[in-house]
Amino acid sequence: MDRVCVMNVGDSFDSRGQDVVTVLSRIRVRRAYYHCTDCRTGTLPKDSDLDIVSTSFSPGVRRLMARVGGKEAFDEGRRDLEPLAGIFVKTKEVERVSETIGEEIASVARRERKAVLSGKIVQIQPVPRMYVAVDGTGVPMLPHETEGRRGKDETGRAKTREAKLGCVFTQVGVDAEGRPIRDQGSTTYVGAIETAQEFRQRIFTEAIRRGALFSKQMVVLGDGAPWIWNIASEHFPGAIEIVDLYHAREHLSELAKVVYGPGSKVAEQWAEARIAELDVGNVETVLTAMARLRPRNDTVKDEDRRAAGYFQTNAERMRYREFRSQGLFIGSGVIEAGGKTIAERGL
């Protein structure tokens, strides 16, 4: 049980002042300071009332600092606060406030995930069709944040860390041409720099919170990475799994460049023909064309083998003609946009 201090004879209090930055101006706040003789500690009750415990920024200013700090580099956020709000702060202060509020938000999210998994939060409104899109993207980091991690460039030092990102959205209908329409305001995102094992619980609880248990049809969209399909098989069994069409097309274009050389007309023609076959879900024909390449260079052989493995493994996730006939999304643009935002601005 927490101890409650009671003012006794011999205890003391005085008035103490502190400058506080508010959204209107910097002000001087005076409040009573109480010192307990028994516990030898002091307290400023008014700080709790004003929500300025251990800070010289008002709640409104902290919200502004966290908002700019969450959308752009801390120093850019600091500079934006000056002309937009007349608030002058240090870059380190924007960083500190943003990280503190970010951790508070993460703590709320952890409690919510725990409540969802325990069955305390249940979405009972039926959802006709729900999508779960998942991706991983590299986020630029400071040198000390990638210490000991291997990178892909010639230096061998990592400059990024992979952030796992997921989004959940719903779809009811299609447009006049039969193309799927994402329900307005239905998209929510979750993400973190963490392992796939940790992330799977994050995206699963978000889907549950959004009504996955009552969804008539679940669809999982991904770029073909095995960890994504592991999540799908464990948490969304029976879901329709779809490899993002544009990722699959990119694999074909890159393979053509490796085999025939970048900028080659033959490479362009080969890729266009394979993409046309892929777009109607004819993966077998694509694989046959790959088998006929028969490159002599060992490096090219390895690339061809890897590409063939990718399409063989994901063949049933690439039946795009069938998916289109069902009015399904076959591209993961919504998650790609989120990944681009993270890569540019940071998680």
Image (spheres, rainbow, N blue to C red):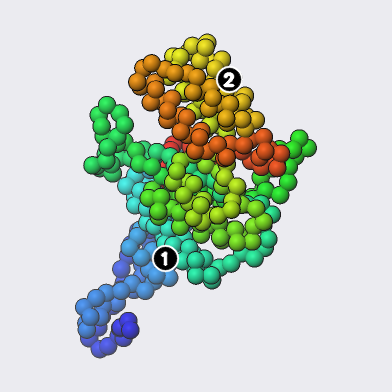
Q: Position of residue 134 (x, y in %)?
A: 50, 45
Residue type for callout 1: Asp
Coordinates of residue 92 in the picture (x, y in percent): 32, 47
Q: Is residue 308 visible?
A: yes
- Residues at marks 2 and 1, CA–CA distance in whole angstroms: 61 Å
First along the sequence among labels 2 and 1: 1
Please tell me whether residue 180 is drawn above or below residue 287 in the rendered image: below
Which residue is under mark 2?
A: 272
Check disc 2 and give the amino acid type.
Answer: Glu
Quadrant of the rendering where the N terminus is positioned: bottom left
Describe the element under mark 2 as helix, strand or loop. helix
Q: Is residue 32 left or right of residue 316?
A: left
* Residue in the image at 37% along x and 50% along y: 195
Q: Is the residue marked by circle 1 packed among few (<14), some (14-19), or many (20+) residues within 10 Å?
A: few
Q: Is residue 277 left or right of residue 94?
A: right
Q: Dividing the image into 4 quarters, which one contains the C terminus?
A: top left
